[in-house]
Amino acid sequence: MRLALVVTAVAALAVASGASTAPEVEHAFRGTIERIDSAQAARMTGVSWRPGCPVPLRDLRLLRLSYWGYDGRVRSGTLIVHRDVAGDVRSVFRRLHAARFPIRRMVPVDAYGGSDFRSIEADNTSAFNCRFVDGTRRWSEHAYGRAIDLNPIENPYVSGGRTSHPASVLYLDRTRRRPGMAYEGGVVVRAFDAIGWGWGGRWSGVKDYQHFSASGR
């Protein structure tokens, strides 16, 4: 009885002081790895995946991940990656969540008809997309499910000092660090370095600040 009174008194004191006795469960990171089910396969087929792609659907995994939005709220997004990198990718986003790194949105590119350009315009963080590298007949690393484009407006593809996306012009100056940007020594680059992935921001010539991949390409 005496112990119960003490616990009650401590709880009352916490409430009176404005402290919360409940854990911040709503802020906890959540990350699940799932197989591609029939419904997801139907959404992807003919859009981000088709017969002849270098990776079969059975080798892909759907990740449901918590992230912090620009509004300061915890949200849930999805990425599709190869099964052999799923655990590592989850660990990256666990670190970004812990650092409260803001992400605009995170949905598969099927929501944009498989269009990389439209996905970028929406500032969408995405991974798998069975497509060629622009201007070539070589498969993109995204076609293998081993690449991620993160906050592509804040982290543009830059060639000749220019970007194809008007909203990214403000982010061409990489010395001015704004929320959502990837840069050397920052949490994003360090998180991907920790799993051995390369960053397009280190390329010579063109820079692809949004792009992280297992191969470094």
Image (tube, grey):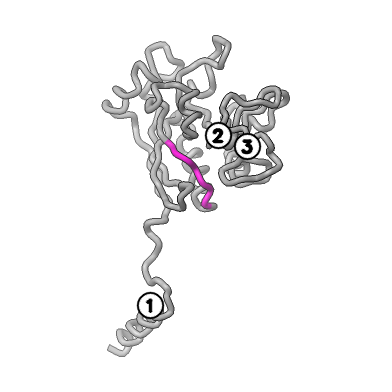
Q: Can residue 198 be seen in this snapshot?
A: no
| Residue at x 59% of width, y 35% of height | 155
Residue at mark 3: 170
Q: Which of the two residues, 94 or 175, is positioned nearer the viewer here? A: 175
Relative to 1, say whether 126 is above or below: above
Element assignment for label 2: loop
Q: Is residue 175 magenta?
A: no
| Label located before the other in sequence (1 or 3) | 1
Element assignment for label 3: helix
Quadrant location, the N terminus: bottom left
Quadrant location, the C terminus: top right
| Label located before the other in sequence (1 or 2) | 1
Q: Amino acid at mark 3?
A: Leu
Q: Amino acid at mark 1?
A: Val
Q: Mark 1 and mark 2: span between their CA atoms?
A: 43 Å
Q: Position of residue 124 (x, y in %)?
A: 47, 34
Q: Counting other residues with Cα less than 10 Å from the Cα at mark 3, is it few (<14), some (14-19), or many (20 or more)? A: few
Residue at mark 1: 15
Q: Counting other residues with Cα less than 10 Å from the Cα at mark 2, is it few (<14), some (14-19), or many (20 or more)? A: many
Q: Mark 2 and mark 3: span between their CA atoms?
A: 9 Å
Residue at mark 2: 153
Q: Mark 1 and mark 3: span between their CA atoms?
A: 45 Å
Range of residues picked out in magenta: 100-106
Relative to 14, say whether 78 is above or below: above
